[in-house]
Image: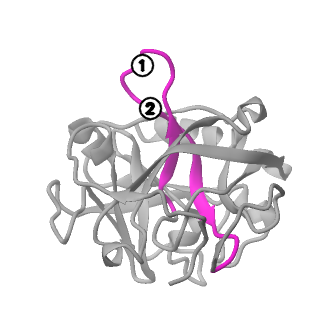
């Protein structure tokens, strides 16, 4: 099923409803399913290309089910009332679009007050090649996208700045359809919560392969100042 696996698939399926793992859940739209993460008291972060953008600029219906596992929705299915994004990303992305391929959903309920939410931090290129990052999402080829998958010790290999403050974060971690919209996060010091630095965006190809040590064929997250600015604006205006 499409997507890029580099060498051995290091992801594993998990069932854990403690914080912060429960902050990740399944996104549903008329166009299909993706992944998302709470990022404020009533905010959820996902990828812009996961939104079913309409020709008139609308976003259609969107729901979020935190902790989703095999059809069970322990905190229910919560509906979005607003979508905040820089772009209405298509399903096939340029680097410029990947760099800002994220959206913040304003939810009808304050689910973040119930299950918690991570912080965020702008990615710094000095972190390139460090084995710091964790990623959670719902890959379609594992349990048919019905269970979340975790990958730890992830490496971001490159950070390519684009106009508008967005950054393409290239990586050779496993990433396949359904994981789009999930958050890549790290932990700082003794903080009891992780901080998001990017959002799952694009796959390099549709094969099992070996990392090339270049940006050719890599998978990509979107991040940068534009991501921090979007989250900060959403928190300030939809507290």
Q: Position of residue 166 (x, y in %)?
A: 75, 49
**Residue toward you, 48 or 153:** 153
Image height check: is 55 above or below 36?
below
Q: Position of residue 160 (x, y in %)?
A: 82, 49
The residue tagged with tag 1: helix, strand or loop? loop
Tell me which corner region of the image, top left, top right, bottom left or bottom right, holds residue 219: bottom right
Residue 1 magenta: no
Image height check: is 153 above or below 26?
above
Extreme residue toward the top, this view: 190
The alpha-carbon separation of the residues under discs 1 and 2 comes to: 7 Å
Please name the residue that numbered disc 1 is placed on: 191
Q: Residue at x 79, y 63 (%)?
A: 95
Please name the residue that numbered disc 2 is placed on: 194
Q: Residue at x 78, y 47 (%)?
A: 158
Label 1: how many Cα within 10 Å (few below 14, some 14–19, many 20+): few
Which quadrant: the C terminus? top left
Q: Pointers 1 and 2 in contact (CB under 8 A)?
A: yes
Q: Position of residue 131 (x, y in %)?
A: 60, 37
Left of 213 or right of it: where is 22? left
Q: Residue at x 55, y 64 (%)?
A: 175
Tell me which corner region of the image, top left, top right, bottom left or bottom right, holds residue 123: top right
Label 2: how many Cα within 10 Å (few below 14, some 14–19, many 20+): many
The residue tagged with tag 2: helix, strand or loop? loop
Give the residues drawn in magenta, as a range.
Answer: 181-206
Q: Residue at x 85, y 51 (%)?
A: 163
């Amino acid at each position: 099923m499409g997507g890029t696996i580099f060498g051995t698939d290091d992801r594993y399926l998990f069932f854990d409803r403690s914080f912060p793992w429960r902050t990740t859940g399944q996104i549903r739209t008329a166009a299909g399913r993706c992944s998302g993460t709470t990022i404020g008291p009533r905010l959820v972060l996902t990828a812009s290309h996961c939104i079913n953008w309409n020709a008139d600029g609308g976003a259609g219906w969107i729901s979020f089910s935190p902790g989703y596992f095999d059809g069970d929705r322990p905190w229910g299915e919560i509906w979005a009332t607003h979508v905040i994004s820089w772009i209405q990303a298509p399903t096939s992305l340029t680097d410029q679009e990947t760099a800002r391929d994220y959206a913040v959903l304003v939810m009808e309920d304050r689910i973040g007050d119930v299950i918690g939410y991570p912080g965020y931090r702008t990615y710094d290129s000095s972190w390139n090649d460090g084995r710091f990052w964790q990623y959670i999402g719902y890959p379609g080829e594992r349990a048919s996208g019905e269970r979340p998958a975790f990958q730890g010790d992830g490496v971001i290999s490159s950070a390519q700045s684009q106009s508008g403050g967005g950054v393409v974060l290239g990586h050779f971690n496993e990433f396949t359809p359904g994981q789009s919209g999930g958050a890549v996060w790290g932990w700082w010091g003794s903080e009891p919560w992780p901080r998001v630095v990017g959002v799952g965006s694009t796959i390099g190809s549709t094969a099992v392969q070996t990392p090339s040590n270049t940006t050719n064929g890599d998978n990509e997250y979107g991040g940068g100042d534009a991501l921090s600015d979007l989250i900060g604006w959403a928190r300030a205006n939809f507290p």
